[in-house]
């Protein structure tokens, strides 16, 4: 695994941890709405994963030495 791929993967993981932390704090602060809050948190985590796919694929291609968007390393 290349350096760029690792960094992008860590960004995705950090986003997931942040989504979980905010969701957990929100559910704790407002227990009457915990079910809706956790569903919204799950949607946020899914969005984080989906938005991280493109940069992760680009980083992987650059680390492998392939051309991305007409540019190489």
Image (spheres, rainbow, N blue to C red):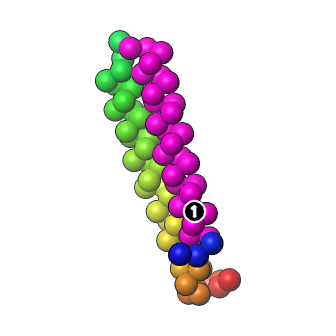
Picture layout, residue 18 above or below residue 65 = above
Task: Indicate the position of residue 63 as horizontal and vertical percent values.
Answer: 59, 80
Picture layout, residue 44 above or below residue 52 = above
Question: Is 57 colored magenta in this rendering?
Answer: no
Residue, far right: 73
At numbered mark 1, what does the secondary structure look like: helix, strand or loop?
helix
Picture layout, residue 44 above or below residue 37 = below
Q: Which residue range is magenta in the image?
A: 4-31
Picture layout, residue 12 above or below residue 72 = above
Does residue 55 appear in the picture of this structure?
A: no
- The answer to which quarter of the image holds residue 34 is top left
Residue, far front: 1
Task: Indicate the position of residue 46 as horizontal and vertical percent values.
Answer: 39, 47
Question: Is 27 colored magenta in this rendering?
Answer: yes
Does residue 62 appear in the picture of this structure?
A: yes
Q: How many circles with numbers are drawn on the protein?
A: 1
Task: Indicate the position of residue 8 as horizontal and vertical percent values.
Answer: 57, 62
Magenta segment, prevailing SS (helix, strand or loop): helix
Residue name at image x 68 percent, y 83 percent: 73
**Mark 1 surroundings: few (<14), some (14-19) or many (≥20) residues within 10 A:** many
Task: Indicate the position of residue 6 as horizontal and vertical percent values.
Answer: 57, 66
Q: Which residue is mark 1?
A: 8
Residue name at image x 49 percent, y 71 percent: 57
- The answer to which quarter of the image holds residue 32 is top left
Name the residue nearer the viewer: 44 or 17: 17
Residue name at image x 63 percent, y 72 percent: 3
């Amino acid at each position: 695994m290349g350096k760029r791929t690792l960094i992008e993967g860590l960004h995705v993981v950090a986003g997931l941890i942040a989504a979980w932390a905010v969701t957990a704090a929100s559910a704790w602060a407002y227990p009457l709405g915990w079910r809706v809050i956790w569903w919204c948190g799950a949607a946020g985590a899914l969005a984080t994963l989906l938005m991280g796919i493109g940069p992760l694929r680009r980083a992987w291609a650059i680390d492998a030495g392939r051309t991305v968007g007409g540019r190489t390393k």
